[in-house]
Image: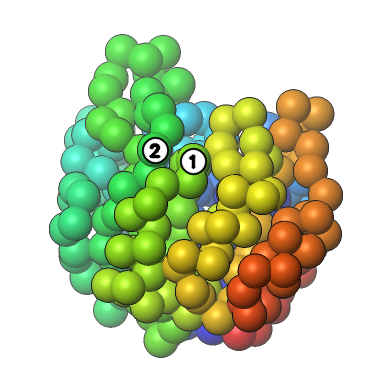
């Protein structure tokens, strides 16, 4: 699988299909390209905050793409004339050959884009299966059921927020990595603004002190293969 990070929590996953997760470009100072330059087949959204729903609506409208999200965000997408697939915690769906399973994330999830007039349901993480099994944790704190996520889905790759303030800090995210037991861990949701500045090398050090996971620190716009 090829993985490209666009800063914050935005990733392009390229297996047999191209899945764009949390496409936050327009107001993302780390994004190296404009959202119109991204080519994908499916969009997945973990929750309704502007830095995660991001430019999903515009990208989907312009390219006639489906959005996979929790039921309430799917309904919001439908009202914007977008094909959407809604699911909820523990549920799975397959879109264009990619399997999406929804798992919990502990956070908040209103839709900024609607001025919070439209419910965003609750935040989520995704297990995305397209050759490799990827766990994108969304925005979350550390919670003990991450052990169960690791046990049930056995992800190859885990994408974990480390920014603190709104999510886990590097030390807590390292504990999550230990519980999830993915072979590869990628930090996300940091350094997009001064309030979530972190050194990903600190996270890497924490992880390496407690488990055998490989930590890959991505550069925005650069593609890695795992």
Residue 59 shows up from this direction: no
Q: Position of residue 70 (x, y in %)?
A: 26, 44
Q: Residue at x 22, y 34 (%)?
A: 72
| Circle 2/circle 1 CB separation < 8 Å | yes
Name the residue tied to disc 1: 141
Q: Position of residue 15 (x, y in %)?
A: 47, 82
Q: Position of residue 221 (x, y in %)?
A: 74, 62
Q: Residue at x 78, y 64 (%)?
A: 205
The disc label shown at residue 77, or none: none
Name the residue tied to disc 2: 106
Of the residues under marks 2 and 1, which one precedes in the sequence? 2
Looking at the rendering, which quadrant does residue 180 occupy?
bottom left
Q: Residue at x 19, y 57 (%)?
A: 90
Q: Is residue 22 above or below residue 48?
A: below
Specify few, some or many for label 1: CA neighbours under 10 Å numbering under 14, 14-19, or 20 or more. Answer: many
Callout 2 secondary element? loop
Q: Quadrant of the C terminus?
A: bottom right
Which residue is nearer to you in this view: 79 or 154?
Answer: 154
Q: CA distance from mark 2 to mark 1?
A: 6 Å
Callout 1 secondary element? loop
Q: Position of residue 99 (x, y in %)?
A: 28, 72
What count of labels does the image hold?
A: 2
Residue 195 shows up from this direction: yes
């Amino acid at each position: 699988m090829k993985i490209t990070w666009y800063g914050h929590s935005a990733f392009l996953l390229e297996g047999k299909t191209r899945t764009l997760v949390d496409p936050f470009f327009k107001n993302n100072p780390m994004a190296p390209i404009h959202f119109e330059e991204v080519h994908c087949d499916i969009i997945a959204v973990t929750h309704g905050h502007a830095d995660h729903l991001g430019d999903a609506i515009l990208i989907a409208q312009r390219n006639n793409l489906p959005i996979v999200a929790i039921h309430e965000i799917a309904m919001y997408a439908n009202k914007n004339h977008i094909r959407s697939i809604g699911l909820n915690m523990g549920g799975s769906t397959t879109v264009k050959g990619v399997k999406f399973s929804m798992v919990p994330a502990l956070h908040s999830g209103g839709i900024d884009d609607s001025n919070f007039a439209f419910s965003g349901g609750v935040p989520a993480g995704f297990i995305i299966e397209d050759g490799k099994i990827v766990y994108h944790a969304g925005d979350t704190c550390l919670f003990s059921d991450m052990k169960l996520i690791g046990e049930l889905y056995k992800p190859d790759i885990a994408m974990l927020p480390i920014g603190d303030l709104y999510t886990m800090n590097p030390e807590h995210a390292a504990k999550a990595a230990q519980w999830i037991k993915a072979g590869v861990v990628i930090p996300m949701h940091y350094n997009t603004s001064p309030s979530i500045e972190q050194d990903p090398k600190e996270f890497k050090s924490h992880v390496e002190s407690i488990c055998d996971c490989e930590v890959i620190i991505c550069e925005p716009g650069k593609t890695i293969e795992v």
